[in-house]
Image: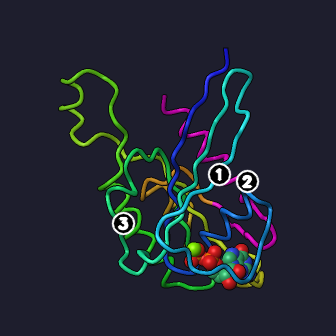
């Protein structure tokens, strides 16, 4: 019998890094220069035939407005099982903000431990949910710039991301790969 899994995934990062564009590209295969800033919270749904017995209903949660505060309410984080943390490769300040977003995520979204009460206590808050780092707008980088990027491999490992990708919502580069990487780690958690 087929089972369905509903996965709530958060898309976070500073204003203008391309969160809405990434979601539109992934779910609707479109790109536009002119998305209005999202008002409040919005989500898009993508159905994945994960394997012969599992259908994944992937909910991508967009935010807007709240970006300027650098953190989000607990309601937004509730029941989330994974996150895409996005920065804009052409704006260093958005990369610096990544750690702030990751810390906020780790403090508010933890996996519910499914073991008994004792192990729950032993684990304290539980484990952080899987997060993938996306350096978006890579289409705007001239090749020379790439070598100046920080060593993202180390950064990714040191700060507990499950992976990182250079993406372009405009050219459709690595969007699928980044989201697949996240969904795979979410499904592996079980
Ligand atoms: P958000 O505030 O994080 O949701 O960012 P948006 O998705 O609204 O994107 C902000 C601006 O960046 C828009 O003008 C987009 O068209 C543009 N943008 C988003 N992704 C890309 C990308 O991969 N490449 C380029 N060149 N522009 C992008
Ligand atoms: Mg947006």
168 in magenta: yes
Mark 3 CB near ligand 2 (8 Å cut): no
Q: Position of residue 48 (x, y in %)?
A: 71, 39
Q: Give the residue displayed 62% in from the left and 55% down from the top.
A: 44
Residue 75 located left or right of residue 31 = left
Residue 55 visible within the image: yes
Looking at the image, which is closer to me, 29 or 127? 29
Q: Give the residue displayed 54% in from the left and 32% down from the top.
A: 188
Does 49 sit above or below residue 133?
A: above
- The answer to whether the residues at label 1 and label 2 have Cβ atoms under 8 Å apart is yes
Name the residue carrying label 3: 72
Q: Give the quarter of the image for residue 140.
A: bottom right
Name the residue carrying label 2: 176
- The answer to whether the residues at label 3 and label 1 have Cβ atoms under 8 Å apart is no
Q: Give the residue displayed 40% in from the left and 57% down from the top.
A: 76
Foreground: disc 3 or disc 1: 3
Q: Position of residue 70 (x, y in %)?
A: 37, 75
Q: Residues within 10 Å of mark 2 (few under 14, many from 20)?
A: some
- Total residue callouts: 3
Mark nearer the N terminus (3 vs 1): 3
Quarter placement of the N terminus: top right
């Amino acid at each position: 019998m087929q089972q369905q899994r509903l996965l709530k995934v958060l898309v976070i990062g500073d204003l203008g890094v391309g969160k809405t564009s990434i979601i539109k590209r992934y779910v609707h295969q479109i790109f536009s220069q002119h998305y209005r800033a999202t008002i409040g919270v919005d989500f898009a749904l993508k159905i994945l035939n994960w394997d012969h017995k599992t259908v994944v209903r992937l909910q991508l949660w967009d935010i807007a407005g709240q970006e300027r505060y650098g953190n989000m309410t607990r309601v937004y984080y509730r029941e989330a099982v994974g996150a895409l943390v996005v920065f804009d490769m052409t704006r260093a300040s958005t990369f610096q903000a990544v750690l702030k977003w990751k810390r906020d995520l780790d403090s508010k979204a933890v996996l519910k431990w499914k073991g008994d009460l004792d192990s729950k206590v032993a684990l304290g808050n539980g484990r952080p949910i899987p997060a993938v780092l996306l350096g978006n707008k890579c289409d705007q980088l001239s090749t020379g710039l790439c070598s100046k990027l920080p060593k993202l491999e180390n950064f990714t490992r040191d700060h507990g991301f499950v992976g990182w990708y250079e993406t372009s919502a405009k050219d459709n580069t690595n969007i699928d790969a980044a989201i697949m990487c996240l969904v795979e780690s979410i499904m592996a958690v079980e």
